[in-house]
């Protein structure tokens, strides 16, 4: 019954959220709203985000059950945690910025990915899911706090940033006039 309830909650989340394509990303703090008639009453207050985290981290409901794992995959369950998803956003935005700036990834701390100034822009390099993303702040966190660089993926992620022209050391002060 618990797995069936979990699957039902995931399906309703997919219908009611802004999920359009790709992995079904449920925030770890998401709880089914109470008194929301777009959800079945038996799911009200269901801690879907916490359950998703437990499935990913502890194998809740899926230990020794490959058919359940397949079922979750078929409905788009996101097997990577939020940190991995955050990294994908960082590296995607960084790759676009680097390409636009001749392989230079020296991003001002205040830089946020812009949205198009009008609908007439026929070519806009930034996909909608990145609009208003704080790329400058995220890269600063990587530089100063090693954000996203912990664990087994750290060396690979560092190499990705190196390939994009990431500046690991910052230059203090104003740029010198040529």
Image (cartoon, rainbow, N blue to C red):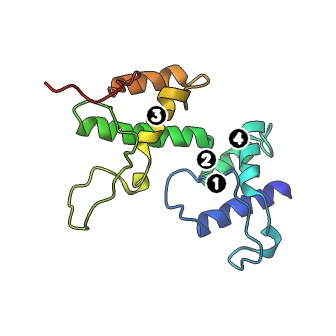
Q: Nearer the viewer, residue 27 or 73?
A: 27
Mark 4 or mark 1, which has the lower sequence index?
1
Tag 3 residue: 140
Residue 151 is tagged as: none
Residue 56 is tagged as: 4
Tell me residue 103's x, y (percent).
Answer: 26, 30
Mark 1 or mark 2, which has the lower sequence index?
1
Residue 26 is tagged as: 1
Q: Residue at point 53% right, 42% down?
A: 86
| Spatial separation of the CA atoms under disc 2 and disc 3 | 27 Å
Q: Nearer the viewer, residue 163 or 112?
A: 112
Report if the CB atoms under discs 1 and 2 are less than 8 Å apart.
Answer: yes
Where residue 153 sits, quadrant-wise, is top right
| Spatial separation of the CA atoms under disc 1 and disc 2 | 8 Å
Label 4: how many residues lie within 10 Å, few (<14), some (14-19) or many (20+)? Answer: some
Q: Is residue 26 left or right of residue 3?
A: left
Tag 2 residue: 78
User: In the orientation shown, which residue stands out farthest toward the right?
Assistant: 1
Label 2: how many residues lie within 10 Å, few (<14), some (14-19) or many (20+)? Answer: some
| Spatial separation of the CA atoms under disc 1 and disc 3 | 26 Å
Label 1: how many residues lie within 10 Å, few (<14), some (14-19) or many (20+)? Answer: many
Mark 2 or mark 3, which has the lower sequence index?
2
Mark 4 or mark 2, which has the lower sequence index?
4
> Which of the two marks, 4 or 1, is nearer to us in this view?
1
Q: Nearer the viewer, residue 175 or 30?
A: 175
């Amino acid at each position: 019954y618990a797995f069936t309830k979990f699957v039902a909650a995931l399906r309703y989340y997919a219908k009611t959220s802004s999920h359009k394509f790709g992995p079904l990303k449920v925030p770890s703090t998401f709880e089914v709203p109470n008194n929301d008639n777009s959800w079945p009453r038996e799911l009200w207050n269901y801690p879907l985000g916490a359950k998703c985290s437990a499935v990913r981290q502890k194998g809740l409901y899926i230990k020794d059950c490959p058919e359940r794992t397949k079922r979750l995959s078929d409905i788009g369950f996101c097997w990577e945690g939020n940190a991995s998803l955050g990294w994908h956003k960082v590296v995607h935005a960084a790759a676009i910025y680097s390409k636009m700036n001749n392989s230079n990834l020296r991003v001002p701390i205040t830089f946020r990915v812009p949205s198009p100034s009008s609908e007439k822009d026929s070519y806009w390099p930034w996909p909608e899911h990145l609009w208003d993303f704080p790329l400058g702040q995220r890269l600063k966190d990587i530089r100063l706090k090693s954000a996203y660089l912990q664990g087994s993926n750290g060396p690979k992620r560092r190499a990705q940033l190196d390939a994009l022209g990431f500046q690991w050391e910052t230059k203090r002060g104003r740029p010198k006039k040529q």
